[in-house]
């Protein structure tokens, strides 16, 4: 099948023999480091969002399941996703000194932490539901602050940053308007820009981003490109079908392309395609969703585009 990526669970052997504990990590090298420190671990071979639903049953009988992904936006989102799939799993938080993008390997090798140190992190791990409660608590505190300061200061138009999302301006401009200290204001503006970058990274986890990645790979192929919704749906089902309970259909994918991404399709010989006139929108969408240029060394050989007639 075109566009097929074979996802595997590296470390299957650790699930045999009724283990009492298992750690799901992000990366094959991280798994080896955990093994070297005496922890049984597994990892999906396709990154933070590659864990498949049909693997869940293998973890149901294991009493202690921990998830320890990279300390970045994709890793945190991926950990929450796996935590929702495995109901009794807990998420391990790496310490702040690990830095943005730090991982299990950094924890043991760069920071020089021990097995005992990591065992303490396991004891402090929390179920995904607690993260939701923490987020709700912070949201309520922010809403209370905004209500208390409502109409005290009119937001200044010159504080609007056109380079960030409008909804972030809606949140940050009122806060900036009541801050007098220039340094504190600059810090808050930098925070807004950082959140904007994180929102772009978040979009990379969305279904729309997955479709854009497929379109990008199809267009990068050496074959003639037709970009039919049928072919895009086929690639999507092969790459991501196991992540969705709903069956992947051409109609569903076509609706997302038209309504969510704003790309018009054109019917020709009974098949809907993305016409060349719409291709100019793709670069803007790639930027919006944080889709980077494909790395040929990472793309599977089976991702050669072969248009469906």
Image (cartoon, rainbow, N blue to C red):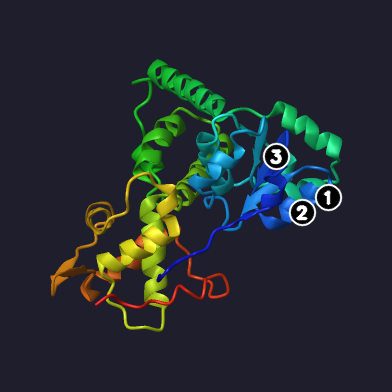
Q: Nearer the viewer, residue 273 or 109?
A: 273
Local packing at callout 1 (Cα closer than 10 Å; few below 14, some 14-19, many 20+) is few
Q: Nearer the viewer, mark 2 or mark 3?
A: 3
Q: Residue 78 appears at what percent x and percent y? A: 54, 45
For mark 3, give the secondary structure.
strand
Q: Residues within 10 Å of mark 2 (few under 14, many from 20)?
A: some
Q: Is the residue marked by circle 3 packed among few (<14), some (14-19), or many (20+) residues within 10 Å?
A: many
How far is disc 2 from disc 3 in space, using C-alphas?
13 Å
Query: Disc 3 designates what residue?
Result: 22
Residue on which disc 1 sits = 36
Q: Residue 154 location in percent, x, y?
A: 34, 28
Residue occupying the point 43% across, 17% down: 144
Q: Residue furthest front?
A: 17
Name the spot of residue 39 as percent of width and height, x first.
Answer: 78, 42
Q: Secondary structure at mark 2?
A: helix
Judged left or right of residue 78, residue 15 is: right
Mark before the other along the chain sequence, 2 or 3: 3
Instruction: Answer whether labels 1 and 2 touch (C-beta < 8 Å).
Output: yes
> Mark 2 touching mark 3, by CB under 8 A?
no
Name the residue at 38% across, 46% down: 165
At 81% from the left and 47% from the top, the residue drawn is 108
Residue at screen point 13% across, 75% down: 269
Spatial CA distance of label 1 from label 2 is: 6 Å
Mark 3 or mark 1: name the one nearer the start of the chain.
Answer: 3
Quadrant housing residue 276 = bottom left
Residue located beneath label 2 in the image = 32
> SS class of the residue under badge 1?
helix
Rounded to the nearest angstrom, the CA distance separating label 3 from label 1 is 14 Å
Q: Quadrant of the C terminus?
A: bottom left
């Amino acid at each position: 099948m075109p566009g097929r990526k074979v996802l595997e669970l590296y470390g299957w052997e650790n699930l045999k023999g009724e283990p009492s504990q298992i750690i799901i990590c992000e990366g094959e090298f991280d798994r080896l480091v955990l093994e070297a420190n005496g922890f049984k671990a597994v990892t999906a071979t396709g990154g933070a969002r590659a864990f498949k639903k049909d693997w869940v049953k293998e973890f149901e009988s294991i009493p202690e399941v921990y998830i320890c992904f990279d300390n970045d936006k994709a890793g945190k989102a991926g950990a929450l996703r796996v935590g929702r799939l495995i109901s009794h799993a807990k998420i391990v938080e790496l310490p702040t000194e690990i830095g943005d993008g730090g991982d299990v390997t950094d924890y043991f090798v760069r920071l020089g932490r021990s097995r005992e140190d990591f065992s303490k992190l396991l004891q402090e791990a929390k179920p995904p539901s607690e993260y939701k409660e923490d987020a709700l608590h912070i949201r309520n505190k922010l809403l209370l602050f905004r209500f208390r300061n409502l109409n005290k200061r009119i937001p200044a138009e010159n504080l609007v940053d056109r380079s960030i999302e409008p909804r972030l301006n809606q949140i940050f401009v009122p806060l900036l308007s009541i801050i007098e200290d220039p340094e504190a204001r600059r810090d808050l503006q930098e925070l807004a820009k950082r959140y904007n970058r994180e929102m772009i990274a978040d979009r990379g986890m969305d279904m729309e981003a997955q479709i854009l990645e497929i379109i990008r790979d199809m267009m990068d192929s050496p074959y003639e490109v037709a970009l039919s919704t049928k072919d895009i749906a086929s690639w999507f089902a092969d790459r991501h079908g196991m992540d969705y309970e709903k069956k992947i259909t051409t109609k569903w994918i076509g609706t997302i392309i038209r309504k969510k991404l704003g790309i018009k399709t054109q019917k020709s010989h009974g098949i809907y395609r993305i016409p060349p006139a719409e291709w100019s929108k793709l670069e803007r969408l790639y930027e919006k969703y944080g889709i980077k240029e494909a790395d040929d060394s990472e793309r599977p050989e089976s991702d050669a585009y072969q248009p469906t007639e």
